[in-house]
Amino acid sequence: MIAQDLRSTWYAYAEPGPTRLQENMMSEREPEILMPSQAGARESGEFVSQPAKLLRIAAMIRELLDEVRKSSPDEAARKRLRAIYTRSLATLKEGLSDELQKELETLTLPLDGTSSESEIRLAQAQLVGWLEGLFHGIQAALWAQHMQARAQFEEMRRRGLAPGSPEEPPGENRRPGQYL
């Protein structure tokens, strides 16, 4: 159920044209997805080096938030939830760029030893909201990359179909058709 919710959130904006949210996100710096082998390639900027890990942690946090909403945890359960929350934040930071780590640190506050059920719920909801915003940013960046690649492909296709394209020197023989 949670994985389905994340997938529907992840692909919610995969429409033919950009939505207002996508246009706003594309106007700012867009996060990049890097494979772990490329993580050292970028010294600055916003990127996620381990998107699968990020999705798993987000699903776990969302499930914990749902459980906290359904029940009333006692003191021992609240201590356990605080520990999970703290570990989750540390694990999330491992897969984020320095800029995203700083953003996450400024938006999340550490839970102290006397955190109430409501404080835990708010902290988890805030983290889930931040992660969903990050996922939407990643999706918008992927959409923009797809549209750019599509435009490049269409341009190459147009040049390949148009006889006597301007890039050809005038004296060379033009071979019609595509090479198979």
Image (cartoon, rainbow, N blue to C red):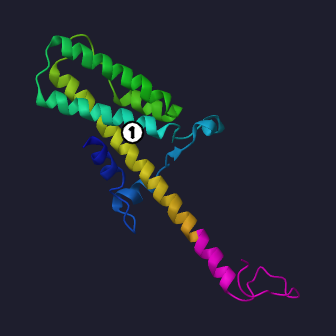
Q: Give whichever of 10, 30 is nearer the camera.
A: 10
Identify the residue at horizontal 22%, vertical 23% (top origin).
120
Q: Say which element carries label 1.
A: helix
Identify the residue at horizontal 42%, vertical 52% (top origin).
139
Indicate yes or no whether the magenta region holds residue 156: yes
- The answer to whether residue 13 is seen in the rendering is yes
Point out the image quarter for the C terminus.
bottom right
Identify the residue at horizontal 46%, vertical 30% (top origin).
101
Query: x, y percentage for residue 43?
Result: 62, 35
Mark 1 nearby-residue class (10 Å; few <14, some 14–19, many ≥20): some
Q: Is residue 7 above or below residue 19?
A: above
Residue 124 falls in image quadrant: top left
**Which stretch did the figure color magenta?**
152-180
The residue that mark 1 highlights is 55
Q: Is residue 138 left or right of residue 112?
A: right
Identify the residue at horizontal 36%, vertical 65% (top origin).
15
Q: Is residue 87 left or right of residue 151?
A: left
Query: x, y percentage for residue 128?
Result: 30, 36
Q: Is residue 164 above or below residue 140?
A: below
Indicate yes or no whether the magenta region holds residue 16: no
- Residue type highlighted by circle 1: Leu
Point out the image quarter for the N terminus.
top left
**Residue furthest right as drawn:** 171
- The answer to whether residue 110 is seen in the rendering is no
Query: x, y percentage for residue 23?
Result: 41, 60
Q: Is residue 110 above or below residue 49?
A: above
